[in-house]
Amino acid sequence: MATIDQIHLSTSLTPAELWRELPCQAQAWMQGLQLPARDAVFLLPFAELLPLARQAFAEQGGWQPRIETVQTLAGSLGPAPDPAAGAPSGDLAIDRLLAAGLLGSVAGVNEWRRRDPAAFDQAVDDVVQATHALLRGACAQAPQDRAAWWTQARVALEATIGPGAVSQSLTGALARLALEWAALGGDVATDRLFDLRPSAWLLLSAGGDDALAGALLHDAAQRGTPVLVLAADAAPQALFQELPPQAPRLWRAIDAETEALAAATAVIQALQQGLAPVALVAEDRLRVRRVRALLERAGVVIADESGWTLSTTRAAAHVMALLRAAHPAANADAHLDGLKAEAGPDEAGWIDVLEAHWRRGGAPDARHMRLLRALERWEICQARWRAFAVPRRQSLAAWLQALRQLLIEGPSAQRWSSDAAARAVWQALRLDSASARSDVDATLMGFDEFTAWVDAALAAGSYIPAIDRDAAQVLITPLARAMLRPFGAVVLPGADERTLGPPPPAPALLGEALLRAIGMPDREARARRAVLGFAQLLRHPQLLLVRRLADGDEHLGPSPWVARLQLARHAQGLSPLPEIDAPLAQQCLQAAPVYPPKPSAAGALPNAVSASAVEALRTCPYRFYARSVLRLTEVEELALDPGKRDFGSLLHAVLQRFHDERTAGRPPAEEHQRLLALADEVAAESQLDGPAMLPFRAGMPAFAQRYLQWLAQRDAQGWRYAAGELDKTCLPDILQGLQLRGRIDRLDRHDSGELQVIDYKTGSLRSLQAKVKQPLEDTQLAFYAAQMLCDEELPPALSAGYVALDEREAITDVPHPDVVSSAQALLAGLADEWARLGQGTPLLALGEGMACEFCEARGLCRRDHWSNRPDDDPA
């Protein structure tokens, strides 16, 4: 039995000095024991160090050992063995399916799943995470010791669970399930390493112990194989005591944006000093994403070793868009997303035509032939999607085959062979072949379950693009992969207490006591490993740590690791590292107050206005300017659930049809049934359905009863329905060429000949009564009356009023007290205002209170940024 020799590599060495020292120490040890270097194996912590080590040994000359990591060495010995049926695969997406099946086989769990699907999904995630952690712990054992380790794990689990509440019992049951499921795992690829018989094993230990490498070397030493550990880490009790001569710099920034700007500035300064390549340490992907955007804007060549979550790639978005579009209940927005996702380079034109047609509510299009062609192309795509979603429930293998066909038959099929990210998506979803596991392929699932599985598989996968490290000026890498690499400079944003310091969490089902009992990293061990990685970063002579002082309203202190470094310096009599404000370039700008806009519309006024346009002009001329002069409109989402406006439109259409076909003498019960039937017809024609329509359908019978009671009173008073949804255009002489265009909800005629303009309202009765309390302030009824005044066959009397349809007790009339006078005043005021606008009078942003609260032009007039304008300011 041989001992494990150890050589300590000083933590004051820079990475470049360490790589000059390391082969000398290794070769001297092998020569001292007269070991053939060519038959030895040298293990490194991670793959990015392989070219550095090989180059260092090559520069030393002579035979060099085989230089590998544990994983690359195992991979060179052959593929990993296939897991047995029912055993975990180590793949998150596959194992979620298997774990859901295991949980579903337990009595009573399916009822729980139906009652609380979110809790069930969380339990599946917890089981999978715990299982994978236990598999990693088992793989770190020598093959002959693994059975005893599983026994020890079972005993430790029972000891740590103990009696407890129901929630603890559930946690314990899930933990037992995870352990027994993980124990089904058989041989692993790294087991073959224990059969190797090199002349010696050498290990570079940095950033904490590697459990598998430790077990491998311990097993080799027991067989008498010489073993050397070159320890680059300091002892935990001596951490930060052996400090490099060049201390890191500390910058602080006010907020997130300033922090990103400071990091980008530091990188560019390092490049200007010839310190390429620069490492940008990605402890927080969101922060580094902003820094990267700033660097790319400056033309810096960047390579990213940390990669992206697969679900954020364009190819993954393509897949999910098609699945949402193919859903049987997909709406127009989902269909548009699906069309745009798979559109070829010449496809955008007809999709734009189709989108414009849908957003206009299906109104006729002037480009009729283009629309017809677009609708034909849309029908072809829809037929493909319908064919994909036809089976209500089928196996995973069948779903994957159908998805493959859907993708390769689309207009953008070439993407799946030409785009590296698309190939990664293809591989993650196993679209070339099934998973080669019958227990997985045969899993039955519905459309929604398959979509959720695809989404989870893409979220669990990662994509690292091919990078050219030699050409890159900046290399984005996680902290654990930045160790011992001789970068020109290292910049680490996010050096605050919340980002840099907290250890990674353990799986929820595995308590710290259990982890400690079975030799897996507990919180203390995880924290120690994390801080060792940071300590290795201190080797770099050009290291900059940047942090923000606050995140929103939350104050942030420095990282606890930086605090430990400061304490170590104090213990050695060194001055503390100064933390300075990030030295950012500053530019003095002259204050430019934002004043209320004063646009002029002379020569650009429309030749026709509606009631809503006149209302906008009276409320806030700038709103009128935005809507009617600039003709700006908000594009509403097609997928919005029907709301109050949609219900109002439905009622308008239902009442118009009802009155257009209504005949005298029909029994009230028959009229009630007819009104309900028309409501169903109109809703179906409008393609409005689903849960959001339940309030409309549920309230319709009571509404019909109230409406027919109101209508009977109108009939008794002598009023008769004359017309509904009446489009009217007129050209009053006083307006000198300005047309009034509007649609009158309803026009009734009295037996005496009087006409009455009626406007249906689904709003508050109180607001309607307040509207007509000051007659000259009401625009809508006055506008419609003004249109009627243009009619040469004006009846002897004209009145107007609102009808409040939403009142629960009874439908209520809200009559206008003198609509003719209001209409005449409206015309006179509009004529005067129009003349002044034509002469260049500015359209001021005068809205106040509720007029501004929900105004779509608020961002355009920039009301929230106005400065107080002095009275004599000519602007």
Image: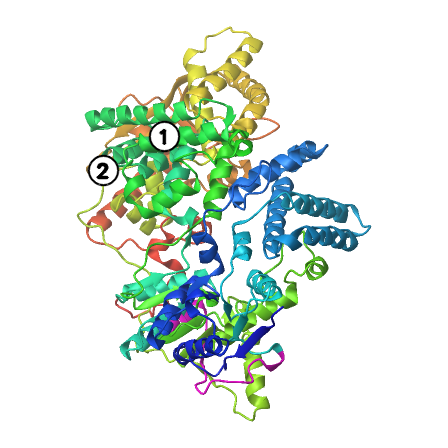
Identified at 53% across, 72% down, the residue is 228
* Residue under numbered circle 1: 406
* Residue under numbered circle 2: 738
**Closer-to-camera residue (471/3):** 3
Q: Quadrant of residue 573?
A: bottom right
Amino acid type, label 1? Leu
Task: For marks 2 and 1, give the CA distance.
Answer: 55 Å
How many discs appear?
Answer: 2
Which range is magenta? Answer: 237-264
Q: Is residue 247 magenta?
A: yes
**Closer-to-camera residue (178/760):** 178
Name the residue at the bottom extreme.
573
Q: Tell me if mark 1 has few (under 14), some (14-19) or many (20+) residues whose alpha carbon lies within 10 angstroms of its own.
A: some
Q: Quadrant of residue 98?
A: top right
> Where 524 sits versus 610, above or below?
below
**Closer-to-camera residue (120/858):** 120
**Closer-to-camera residue (359/513):** 513
Identified at 49% across, 59% down, the residue is 70
Find residue 534 and report its horizontal and vertical position in percent.
Answer: 51, 73
> Where 821 sits versus 231, above or below?
above
Q: Tell me if mark 2 has few (under 14), some (14-19) or many (20+) residues whose alpha carbon lies within 10 angstroms of its own.
A: some
Residue 331 at least partly seen: no
Amino acid type, label 2? Leu
Q: Is residue 138 magenta?
A: no
Quadrant containing the N terminus in the rendered view = bottom right
Identified at 63% across, 50% down, the residue is 130
Name the residue at the front extreme.
34
Secondary structure at numbered mark 1: helix
Secondary structure at numbered mark 2: loop
Closer to us: mark 2 or mark 1? 1
Find residue 555 and report its horizontal and vertical position in percent.
Answer: 55, 71
